[in-house]
Image: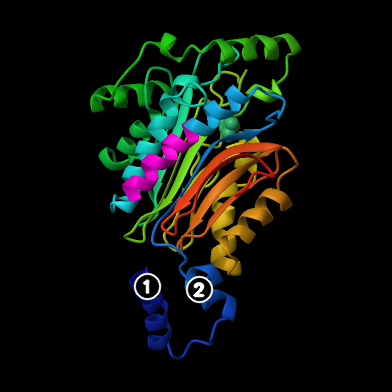
């Protein structure tokens, strides 16, 4: 990590020295973010399983099932990072585990659209070079995060939607499923309830999954995967696959994955805004995340996970709960659901 920062700091310094006629820019533009200057961990990971109204009035078994699923995914990521795996591999593998769980609104457990279908979105981003891949509205792909990664690595494009994304999936030979694969009774009941009320069913509208990572090589990566929002209309695309809204990673600043009311996250360009506050204002990761979640969004809109270039983790939300977990090379390992769970 020390090596990384030496490398990163040398370029601006060299540029500054070579442009001696230029006036010295304000300190905030040249100073590295305070937390970036003091690396805290050799590797770090945070995951989320969605934010929203999560009632405490649920049985122990339900809580334990979610905690266990988060722990399983976090343990996989932690072990991979400890062994020196590349951040992007960790993000993809961890999200695949969460996508395969019926508990979360991604992959297998995706929510239903207004028309009773499942249309899945995902995105992944590499903090080394800002390369990224996203897909939206797929209906037969088992693990959308892997397809998003293939868009990034195997195409000249960044974003494929609907039939085009399915066609690309076919070309890439990714695992396909029948649309019935996504049927989860709880999600179906939530749609019926939402249709009855003709409004979002609060308790069931969230559950998106995400993962952000700093690997041992000092690289940041972020990924997010979702079924979207219960009762969403034809062709609706949320924040998750919109780079800079629900997903963003840049080695110079932070990796971010969001969850919540997608339209609000798109309007506020949330993930990139966290990065911009670190880059332009010199804020630490937590402060930047808090400014955006508490200062720009409305109460109940959702939250985000973020990991900075020094390994600092922030998990910030303005809803009653957010399924989440964090681990790092200093021995931190925890999962939580509500605001007062330990972070
Ligand atoms: N942000 C997702 C969307 O709007 C939903 C969620 O995070 O639960 O599609």
Q: In this view, does 256 lie above or below 162?
A: below
Residue plotted at (55% across, 47% down): 305
Q: Nearer the viewer, residue 223 or 139?
A: 223
For disc 1, the marked residue is 2
Q: How crowded is mark 1: few (under 14 residues within 10 Å), some or many (20 or more)?
A: few
Going from the N terminus, do you reach mark 1 or mark 2 first?
1
Range shown magenta: 69-81
Q: Where is residue 176 in the image (x, y as percent from the top left)?
A: 32, 18
Query: How many callouts does the rendering have?
Result: 2
Residue plotted at (36% across, 76% down): 6
Q: Is residue 45 visible?
A: yes
Residue plotted at (49% across, 53% down): 332
Image-quadrant location for residue 91: top left
Image-quadrant location for residue 280: bottom right
For disc 2, the marked residue is 32
Q: Is residue 154 above or below residue 54?
A: below
Ligand 1 closer than 8 Å to label 2 CB: no
């Amino acid at each position: 990590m020390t090596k990384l920062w030496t490398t990163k700091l040398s370029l601006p310094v060299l540029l500054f020295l070579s442009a001696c006629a230029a006036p010295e820019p304000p300190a905030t533009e040249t100073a590295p973010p305070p937390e970036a200057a003091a690396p805290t961990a050799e590797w770090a990971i945070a995951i989320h399983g969605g934010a929203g109204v999560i009632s405490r009035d649920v049985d122990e078994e339900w809580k334990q099932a979610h905690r266990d699923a988060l722990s399983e995914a976090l343990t996989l990521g932690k072990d991979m990072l400890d062994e020196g795996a590349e951040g992007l591999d960790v993000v993809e593998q961890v999200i695949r585990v969460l996508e395969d769980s019926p508990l979360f609104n991604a992959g297998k457990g995706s929510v239903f659209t207004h028309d009773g279908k499942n249309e899945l979105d995902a995105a992944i981003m590499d903090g080394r070079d800002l390369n990224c891949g996203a897909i939206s509205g797929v209906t037969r792909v088992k693990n959308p995060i892997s397809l998003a990664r293939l868009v990034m690595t195997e195409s000249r494009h960044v974003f494929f939607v609907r039939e085009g994304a399915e066609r690309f999936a076919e070309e890439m030979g990714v695992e396909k499923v029948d649309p019935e694969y996504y049927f989860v009774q709880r999600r179906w009941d939530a749609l019926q309830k939402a249709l009855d009320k003709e409004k979002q069913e609060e308790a069931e509208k969230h559950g998106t999954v995400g993962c952000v990572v700093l690997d041992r090589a000092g690289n940041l990566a972020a990924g997010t995967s979702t079924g979207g929002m219960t009762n969403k209309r034809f062709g609706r695309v949320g924040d998750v696959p919109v780079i800079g809204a629900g997903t963003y990673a840049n080695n110079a600043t932070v990796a971010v994955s969001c969850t919540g009311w997608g339209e609000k996250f798109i309007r506020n360009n949330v993930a990139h805004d966290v990065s911009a506050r670190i880059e332009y204002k010199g804020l630490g990761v937590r402060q930047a995340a808090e400014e955006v979640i508490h200062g720009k969004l409305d109460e109940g809109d959702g939250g985000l996970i973020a990991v900075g270039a020094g390994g600092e983790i922030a998990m910030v939300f303005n809803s009653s709960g957010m399924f989440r977990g964090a681990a790092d090379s200093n021995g931190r390992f925890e999962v939580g659901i509500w605001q007062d769970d330990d972070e």
